[in-house]
């Protein structure tokens, strides 16, 4: 048992001193007379962890635990009007900077955590973007199509731990490549992306920076084969081709004058053929295919953050409020992944998020509960006998 609620113990993981330094630097509490930045942060974390649907739900939920608010570091629960005002006017960069500070503080817990590719010791980055639909009549600043609104969340995940090391929220019309062109990756690292990012000039810049990439070759790509490498069909019967190619299109050949490597493979389960493109000529053909297969982890991340956190429906309609809700969702996801990595019990993220939501205000020891969330029948029976036997 514990004297603190589960939510209070979760909040204690957050470095309050680091948050206060960011608040002081950005002056987000300047002229503040009511809801300070820390209370705002706790309110948004409760929005995601408690699956609150509105500012009224957040306000009423925190008001229901008035006796335990001081354990959260806040003096009083925010009213819905104050929370709405702060979502509209407090600088969202506060939440962005705190996310990266928290990631730096906790990243040691995720080092070396890889589901696959144990033989590849390089740093691997997974890059993708997803569109979050919005109602155009309420979010008129986020016009996407004639009758649709939306924003686009661009992410780069570190494959070790699969957490964002870069994130940017833009209007849905913004093309992924425009964001990718601004990024810089460490030399000798590997960047994995889908066909939506193919821009040969940018890919040539990656190659010039000694950054490896793995992607899919477009069906309409114009190229010529320079060398066909021998493949061992007995060892890897699904491998169809491993070749060095030269781009032939007028613009493509100018944008990427060097040679590339093309790997064709057959998915025997689905019966589909996949063609991969990379600038690394030393890996085995199977390694190239395996690296691209790990790109699915970023799709899983998008699915998790949309399903388990409040990122598809927003409690504020301004651009600032949407930014705050997305960045607070990333902070919450970082906390959940940290707890999952620390726990001895093999949690699935969906179960962990649900169990925390059901026990937010229960006074149980966090780490003991994470390591052993269920009592066995034997333990339960022993406790009952001890009660009656005195």
Image: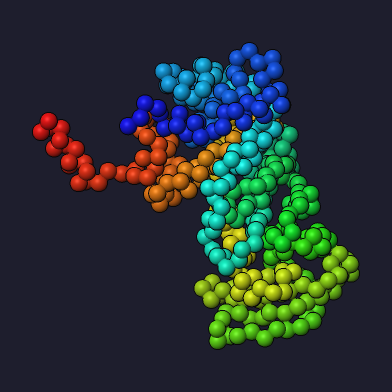
Work out whether 329 lies above or below 78. below
Work out whether 85 lies above or below 124. above
Identified at 60% across, 66% down, the residue is 120
Q: Percent position (x, y) of residue 381?
A: 17, 42
Image-quadrant location for residue 276: bottom right
Q: Percent position (x, y) of residue 376?
A: 25, 46
Residue 88 in view of the camera: no
Q: In which quarter of the image is the N terminus?
A: top left
Identified at 78% across, 81% down, the residue is 225
Identified at 69% across, 33% down, the residue is 93
Does residue 60 appear left or right of residue 290 in this picture? Answer: left
Q: Which residue ends up furthest to the left in the rendered image?
A: 389
Does residue 222 appear left or right of residue 389 in this picture? Answer: right
Image-quadrant location for residue 352: top left
Identified at 65% across, 58% down, the residue is 123
Q: Percent position (x, y) of residue 78?
A: 54, 19
Q: Quadrant of the C terminus?
A: top left
Image-quadrant location for residue 126: bottom right
Q: Percent position (x, y) of residue 388?
A: 11, 32
């Amino acid at each position: 048992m514990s004297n603190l609620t589960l939510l209070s113990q979760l909040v204690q993981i957050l470095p309050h001193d680091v948050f206060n330094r960011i608040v002081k630097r950005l002056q987000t509490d300047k002229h503040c007379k009511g809801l300070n930045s820390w209370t705002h942060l706790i309110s948004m974390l409760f929005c995601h962890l408690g699956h609150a649907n509105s500012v009224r739900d957040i306000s009423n939920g925190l008001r229901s635990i008035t006796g335990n608010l001081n354990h959260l570091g806040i003096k009083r629960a925010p009213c819905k009007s104050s929370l709405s005002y702060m979502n509209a006017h407090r600088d969202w960069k506060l939440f962005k900077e705190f996310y990266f500070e928290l990631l730096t503080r906790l990243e040691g817990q995720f080092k070396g955590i890889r589901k696959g590719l144990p033989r590849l010791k390089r740093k691997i980055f997974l890059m993708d973007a997803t569109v979050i639909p919005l109602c155009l009549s309420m979010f008129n600043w986020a016009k996407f199509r004639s009758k649709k609104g939306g924003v686009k969340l661009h992410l780069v995940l570190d494959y070790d731990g699969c957490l964002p090391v870069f994130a940017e929220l833009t209007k849905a019309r913004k093309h992924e490549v425009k964001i990718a062109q601004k990024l810089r990756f460490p030399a000798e690292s590997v960047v994995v992306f889908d066909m939506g990012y193919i821009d040969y000039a940018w890919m040539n810049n990656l190659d010039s920076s000694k950054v490896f990439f793995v992607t899919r070759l477009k069906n309409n790509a114009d190229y010529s084969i320079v060398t066909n490498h021998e493949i061992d069909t007995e060892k890897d019967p699904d491998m169809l081709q491993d070749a060095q190619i030269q781009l032939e299109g007028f613009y493509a050949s100018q944008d990427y004058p060097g040679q590339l490597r093309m790997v064709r493979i057959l998915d025997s389960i689905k019966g589909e053929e996949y063609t991969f493109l990379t600038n690394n000529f030393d890996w085995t053909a199977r390694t190239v295919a395996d690296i691209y297969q790990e790109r699915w982890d970023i799709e899983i991340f998008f699915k998790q953050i949309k399903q388990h956190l409040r990122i598809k429906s927003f409690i504020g309609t301004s651009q600032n409020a949407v930014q705050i809700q997305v960045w607070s969702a990333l902070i919450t996801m970082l906390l959940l992944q940290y707890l999952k990595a620390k726990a001895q019990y093999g949690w699935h993220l969906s179960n962990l998020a649900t169990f925390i939501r059901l026990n937010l205000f229960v006074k149980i020891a966090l780490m003991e509960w994470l390591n052993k969330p269920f009592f066995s029948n034997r333990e339960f029976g022993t406790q009952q006998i001890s009660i009656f036997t005195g």
